[in-house]
Amino acid sequence: MTADRLHSIARHYASLRIAVVGDFCLDRYLEIDPAHRETSIETGLPVHNVVAVRAQPGGAGTILNNLAALGIGAIYPVGFCGEDGEGFELRRALAARPGVRLDYLLETGQRRTFTYCKPLMMGPNQPPRELNRLDSKNWTPTPVEVRDEIMASLRALAPNVDAMIALDQVDVAGTGVITPRVLDTIGSLAAARPRLLIITDSRRGLRGWPPVMFKMNAAELAALTGSAPMTDFGQIERTAANLAQKNGRAVVVTMAERGMMGASPDGTVEHVQALPLRGPIDIVGAGDSVTANLASALAAGATLREALELAITASSIVIHQLGTTGTASVAEMAGLLGQRK
């Protein structure tokens, strides 16, 4: 992959329309200055003084952040947020991203806004150190009314987008956006529109998902296919190729420092090496940058290998961004590719 080829692919990005369906959450960062340490008079416990607060979209919003950084022309978040302060912050943060259309993001009093609150200790001349996170989630099944609105949004968007990304971020099945009925809808859309690129990812694995493009790590591939844990490249290749042929869609397997593998339904398998580390890293958000770049590049006409190369480049940029869930722009990726000549 060269910078010139990247620009040739990326010139189509401004005309792309991509829907992101999944669990949008708010990443709220609390920056703590240890120089202002106090002790509570009431409890005798240490007080952490917050000197800065910043918020950005997380979960499926991290994929959206990466799509916006790439310059995708129209990005449609499909999901929900609560009628609460976190929901207000989330909608404001999403609306601030270029290209984002909020027509299909439901605001509902039946759900809380999924929030990751991340206290960061900001010591001088050292990377931020994350303390215990404070999460706000939903622990009950997603209400039928919310589910049905999400399904209607997907049906309305499918004829009008170039790609669709689905991310299941919740720990308890059925409590987020991707419910069994929503999966049925995604499957129906994929069957009715076989040329529509639909790429999926789930923190709980992809068992039970319809045959669309799967993105997963090697452990998730083994769990999905009932295989023993896989470390051998040949075994991963064969398993991914068999799954791609069975589904009739490509399968992408991420392997951390060992790079990334992609299998096509015709049996072709591509392997792209990871880039060397250039300093301290934070892997949070790397997988979402991969998903965003795969969808964008493939929708723009790139080959599977080219999409893998762009995804690995983007993830290398993201992991070197500390104290945040980062993104990679076309300019940043071109700069890194230029350095590799």
Image (cartoon, helix red, strand yellow):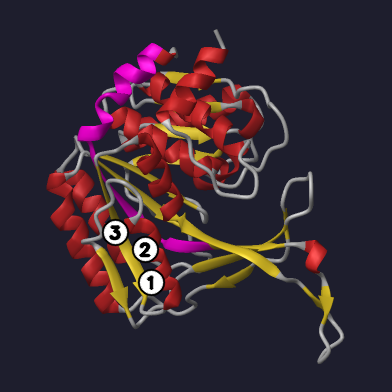
Contact between marks 2 and 3 (CB within 8 A): the answer is: no
Q: Give percent across and percent down for residue 165.
A: 34, 46
Q: Amino acid at mark 2?
A: Arg
Number of marks in picture? 3
Quadrant housing residue 51:
bottom right
Quadrant housing residue 37:
bottom right
Report the Cα–Cα distance between label 2 and label 3.
15 Å
Residue receiving disc 2 = 92
Tell me the SS state at disc 3: strand
Residue receiving disc 3 = 78
Q: Give percent across and percent down for residue 149.
A: 22, 69
Say which label, 2 or 3, has the lower sequence index.
3
- Nearest the viewer among 155 and 181 is 155
- Nearest the viewer among 325 and 176 is 325
Tell me the SS state at disc 1: helix
Q: Residue furthest right?
A: 44
- Nearest the viewer among 59 and 51 is 51
Q: Which residues are magenta?
A: 4-27
Decide: few, some or many residues near mark 2? Use Cα within 10 Å; few <14, some 14-19, many ≥20.
some
Q: Give percent across and percent down for residue 280.
A: 72, 36
Describe residue 231's horizontal placement relative to residue 207 as left or right: right
Say which label, 1 or 3, has the lower sequence index.
3
Q: Amino acid at mark 3?
A: Val
Q: Is residue 125 magenta?
A: no
Residue 261 showing in the rendered view: no
Mark 2 vs mark 3, foreground winner is 2
Q: Amino acid at mark 1?
A: Phe
Decide: few, some or many residues near mark 1? Use Cα within 10 Å; few <14, some 14-19, many ≥20.
some
Residue receiving disc 1 = 88
Q: Measuring 65% from the left and 40% from the top, which residue is drawn there?
A: 229
Tell me the SS state at disc 2: helix
